[in-house]
Amino acid sequence: MSTTESVPTGGQPVDSASADGRPAGRLTVMGDRDELATALSNVFDNAVKYSPKDVRIRVEVLTPDLRHVQIRVQDNGIGISRGELKRIFKRFYRALAPATTPVKGSGLGLFIVRAIARRHGHAGLADETIHIKAKGTAGQSFGAWLAAGVTLELEGQANDYVGKGLSGGRIIVYPPAQARITPEKSIIIGNTALYGAIAGECYFRGVAGERFAVRNSGAIAVVEGAGDHGCEYMTGGIVVVIGETGRNFAAGMSGGIAYVLDEDGSFAKRCNLAMVELQPVAEEEEMMQKSYHQGGDLDSHGRVDVMGDMTRFDAERLHQLISNHARYTGSERARHILEQWDEYKPKFRKVMPVEYRRAIEELIARGGAPSLAAAE
């Protein structure tokens, strides 16, 4: 096995350990699977042993077929023992072998989630405590039951059931930079994504298969297109589609909201209106009008509680989520919409369940908190 120079956050090469013995910010290793598993275990052993609060560790591993995985622990005091970290990352590498087969999707997060849940429950960890980046094709259930504080970033594509049972955290999927595809016209994840999700957020630079966000009850998702039966039986959360959808959208949708870009005015024909109504995206009292004309500067915009009152702040909520999508995935489609916001905003349709809206309005009239109604 060979090791290359370690690179800290500042980008200057240094030795693999600093003068006081603490691990450096970055270590790159090459070798076979067993050697790599041992190297990973040693790196994270040192990380937990010294627990330097100001060091973000990124481990980049190149497997023989050049598929690589990056793992970053932002805060080493995450409450997981050294022994458990060793077991976690040994299992992580077993999930990648043999190198000629696709990465098993659920192997990229489930064992980490189990360790977090035992110690922290549903609350999980602080945002971005653990960030895992992978390249390649993920199999079934990528990011299933992901916990708060964990980000899974995939440069490639994934199969069915992405984010199944999502309970927090963040899933990001986008095509490789060298891919000669148009993301908003190309499938990036399979069918039945976000099945039964209760929390967390997802950003997919590409088109999802059928039954996207089926039975979603609390997660946030942005996607660039979706197949038939999108948001089926959805009871909570937010879905943004900045591309085309298939037929029977929102069938059985009783809660949550969706925003769909309807460029040709045909979305109403593909939406099941038995339980929902379509509304324009209204701006809240000229909110952020100045910001919207600052050339797409994503950091200049105001922020709203996206899971707050689902009957208001539509333009602000939508703009904020599309901005997140552009930032996390590098989506050119999202950036174009933001740069031409005045043109695109009127083309979005808000999908709002009728009884859900009535329940929120009644709760507000009684002096209740609309965010509670949105979460129930």
Image: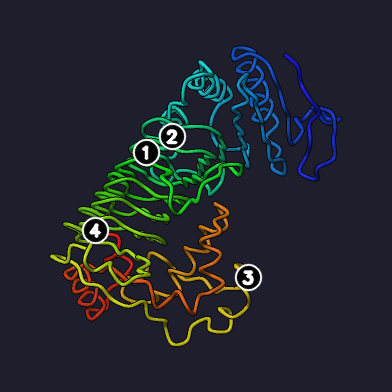
**Coloured how?**
rainbow
Task: Give the Cα separation between the discs numbered 1 and 2.
Answer: 7 Å
Measured from the top left, where is residue 170 in percent x and y?
47, 47
Measured from the top left, where is residue 103 in percent x and y?
47, 26
Q: Is label 1 in contact with label 2 (beta carbons under 8 Å)?
A: yes
Q: Which amino acid type is marked by label 1?
A: Trp
Local secondary structure at mark 3: loop
Task: Give the Cα separation between the discs numbered 3 and 4.
Answer: 32 Å
Would you call the spot at circle 2 few (<14 residues within 10 Å), some (14-19), or many (20 or more)? many
Q: Earlier in the sequence, mark 1 or mark 4?
A: 1
Image side of residue 109 versus residue 23, left or right? left
Q: Which amino acid type is marked by label 3?
A: Asp
Q: Tell me which corner region of the image, top left, top right, bottom left or bottom right, holds residue 222.
A: bottom left
In the image, residue 29 above or below residue 186? above
Q: Name the residue: 49% across, 67% down.
A: 320
Image side of residue 159 versus residue 249, left or right? right
